[in-house]
């Protein structure tokens, strides 16, 4: 069987460098999503499970819509609420675990409407307060499965793609440095 032209060509150092310029950003993006978005979200969710619920009065609530250049709309919630813990009054402004706008499901819209309704009617809402640091609070401490799945999926796809190429390059470079004749 005849081998295709160039099938037995060995990668050059320049070729590996060009491949690195392409692959490293993918690996870094996957790692960045995991370390700077997903891990802090899961960490906050885990520590919020021990927080205490207290009633709060919503002072302001805004559902903001953000339109992308492609026409998609994402939402974020801004709020300000007052609550008491151990006889001391505090003000909070954290609506949910993450503060970034998104368009994953209707979570942001539902939370925004809930808080706007509570502000309008004067009805108290439950907020979750860190008993060790009572000035730290959140309205909704739920971990959103859709957002978690998206972040983990992106981290896996980008990280695996870039990581595999970087691993292959490192292995090839190692072989080339150890024995230039067989690499």
Image (cartoon, helix red, strand yellow):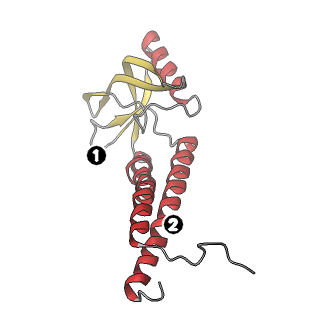
Q: Residue at x 58, y 42 (%)?
A: 146
Q: Is residue 6 above or below residue 149?
A: below
What residue do we see at 43% from left, 34% from top?
A: 96
Which image quarter: residue 48? top left
Q: Is 104 drawn above or below residue 163 in the view shown?
A: above
Up the image or down, 27 lies above or below 78; here it is below
Q: Which residue is mark 1?
A: 132
Name the residue tied to disc 2: 164
Q: Nearer the viewer, mark 2 or mark 1?
A: 2
Residue nearer the viewer, 10 or 69 = 10
Tag 2, which secondary structure?
helix
In percent of the image, x 37 and y 20: which residue is there? 57
**Residue furthest top as drawn:** 120
Q: Residue furthest right?
A: 1
**Residue 102 x, y percent position in the rendering:** 49, 32
- What is the CA distance from the residue labelled 2 to the residue labelled 1? 43 Å
Residue nearest the observer in this picture, 152 or 132: 152
């Amino acid at each position: 069987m005849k081998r295709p032209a160039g099938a037995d060509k060995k990668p050059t150092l320049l070729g590996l460098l060009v491949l690195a310029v392409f692959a490293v950003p993918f690996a870094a993006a996957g790692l960045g999503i995991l370390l700077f978005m997903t891990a802090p979200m899961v960490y906050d969710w885990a520590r919020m499970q021990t927080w205490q619920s207290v009633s709060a009065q919503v002072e302001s609530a805004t559902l903001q819509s953000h339109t992308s250049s492609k026409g998609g709309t994402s939402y974020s919630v801004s709020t300000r609420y007052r609550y008491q813990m151990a006889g001391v009054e505090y003000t909070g402004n954290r609506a949910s675990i993450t503060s970034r706008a998104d368009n994953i499901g209707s979570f942001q819209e539902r939370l925004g409407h809930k808080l706007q309704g509570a502000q309008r009617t004067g009805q108290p809402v439950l907020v979750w307060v860190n008993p060790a640091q009572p000035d730290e609070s959140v309205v909704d401490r739920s971990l959103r499965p859709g957002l978690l799945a998206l972040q983990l999926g992106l981290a896996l796809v980008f990280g695996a793609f870039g990581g595999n190429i970087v691993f292959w390059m490192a292995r090839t470079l190692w072989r080339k440095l150890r024995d230039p004749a067989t690499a």
